Amino acid sequence: MRTIETPGPMPAISVTGLRKSYGSHRVLDGIDLTIPQGTIFSLLGPNGAGKTTTVQILSTLIRADAGEIWVAGHDLAGEPDTVRAAIGVTGQFSAVDHLLTGEENLRLMADLLHLGRSRGGRRIRELLDRFGLTDAARKPVAAYSGGMRRRLDLAMTMVGTPRIIFLDEPTAGLDPRSRRTMWQIVRELVEQDGVTIFLTTQYLEEADELADRIALLSQGELVAEGTPQELKRLVPGGHIVVRFADADGYRRAVPHIGATSRDDAALTAQIPGSGGVKTLKNLLEWLDTQAVDVAELTVHTPDLDDVFLTLTQESSTKEPSR
Amino acid sequence: MRAITDSATMLRRQIKHIWRYPSLILTFAAVPVVFLLLFVYVFGGTMGAGIGGDRTAYVGYLTPGIMITTIAGAAQGTAISVATDMAEGIIARFKTMAIARVSVLTGHVLGAMVQTFIAIAVVTGVAVLIGFRPSASALDWLGVVGALVMFTFAITWLSVALAMVSKSVTTASNLPMPLMILPFLGSGFVPTESMPTGLRWFAEHQPFTSVIETLRALLAGRPAGSSFVEAAVWSAVIALAGYLWARRLYNR
């Protein structure tokens, strides 16, 4: 049964029943996706889950075995060149020419996009400035740091003002500071340029930080999809851990606070709950009235790690090993 | 139209690579120069007597063969640089752009031809220094350059295809190696008449010999005749096969 959809703006990417196998190895096994324009979508999954294959198919690099794919309003199989004109790809391994300078790399893009001398020059200066590469513009890329290469990579993608950008693990191998700079740049692309971002990552923190919606890919299937908040609600894992100051208080309190697990030696008890303010307030008030001394109290909210580990584990135990 | 402008852009990329790393041309030129010196000064006396002349006569006989050896050697360099480039992320970027797809390959071919011609010029310069005195007219020289362009074009497309069929850069550097042997198994270094029957038949009918004979005739100021036509046909066949093969591998 299909529900009748209200006519809205066309999604940036829509995928139904995407399949891809290499020989007998099934890499993607029926993927469905809808990504609205101007949002950041993150495809999350462990190594070998099929993330890169998905990006390669959606960006016209390789052909799908089956499935209907629309990118930027065009049928991927029928009009690959129209799709190519609307997208930009920044791959896992920086797609820059290491023998040229940063400026020459951008000029190469401008020439291939037929921007013309003056318009291309303006765009190049603008991008060098925006991505903090003006000082290094005349240096060969071989001398760039990892972070600079990724920024140049993205700048090259931006020369053609694409409407959809595929970022395949854009911060893999970067130091924390460069990673944060990249995140800021990605956010600006969406806010200032209205670009739609399709991001793949292994870093849950990155997806949590950037994505409007996240899909979890495990062994070629989507095991969950939703906003980071929705995904976090999928798995239990929120709890409060109380460590008592003395054995007496511990003995008196534990039977009454709804602890699900306890550690008599360490004098700690774990209380389930997502750590809402009300639960916490009630607990503290009760401990206070009973004059129980608490040495330490920590609140653990479920994070995407819990979701990721739980869901990818479920799907790997569900599936017979191939 | 788009194919021409995009190929020109890709050629500019290759020229910048050559300009920044000119050492590759020296490598291209070094092996044929060593061959030239070795054959002229070590074997030259005997070889010269063999063709009914002296060492200087052998320089004249040998130089066309060395020119073709230069093309075969450069093919190896081309294969290495194409295979290296194909492993780079930037090729994936080019493939996801709305550009003339073949321009990545034509850029490589044209760039490799520029490199090969610089190497041929260096090698010919050394030959002149050690006594090579061509008696070609301006028109003959035009024919020489024409034959070299056709054959370089063909061998370069072939080496691009060989580079793309290789899984690694190491394989890519080895696959065009047999091309280096073909001038020996032709009229590059000695007249085919001196070879045993089977080998002689092969030597007289393989593509390298037709090109070498064309160059040898024109450089000596003689008409090249049917060997020029043969060289042109061979070049066209090899170029077309190499182009179609390379294009299929690239679009895979």
Image (cartoon, rainbow, N blue to C red):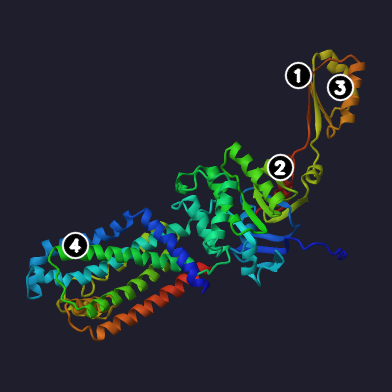
Q: Which residue is at the front of the view, A267 or B164?
A: B164
Lower sequence index among marks 1 and 2 = 2
The answer to whether tags 1 and 2 share a subunit is yes
**Are circles 1 and 3 on residues that touch, CB within 8 Å?**
no
| Mark 1 or 3, nearer chain start | 3
Chain of the residue under the numbered disc 2 shown in the image: A
Image height of B13 relative to A80, above or below: above
Q: Quick one: A242 or B115, which is closer to the camera?
A: B115
Which residue position holds label 2? A209
Name the residue beneath numbered marker 1: A265
The residue depicted at 86 percent of the width and 32 percent of the height is: A276
SS for dot 2: helix
Q: Amino acid type of disc 4?
A: Val
Please give left or right for residue B109 compared with residue A64 in the image: left
B120 lies left or right of B51: right
Amino acid type at mark 1: Ala
What is the distance, in whole Å, between disc 1 and disc 3 at their CAs?
Answer: 13 Å
Q: Is residue A25 above or below residue B155?
A: above
Using the numbered discs, state the Cα–Cα distance from disc 1 to disc 2 in whole angstroms. 38 Å
Q: Do labels 3 and 2 share a chain?
A: yes
- Residue indicated by mark 4: B126
Residue at coordinates 12% horizontally, 70% vertically from top-left? B58
Mark 3 or mark 2: name the one nearer the start of the chain: 2
Q: Is residue B244 visible?
A: yes
| Disc 3 and disc 4 in contact, CB within 8 angstroms | no
Q: Cα distance, mark 1 to mark 4?
A: 88 Å
Q: What residue type is labelled 2?
A: Glu
Q: Of A155 and B82, which appears nearest the observer?
A: A155
Is residue A102 depicted above or below B41 in this figure?
A: above
Residue B141 in the image: x percent, y percent?
A: 24, 76
Examine the image and state in which quarter residue A70 appears: bottom right
- The percent position of residue A181, horizontal first and vertical second, equals 62, 41
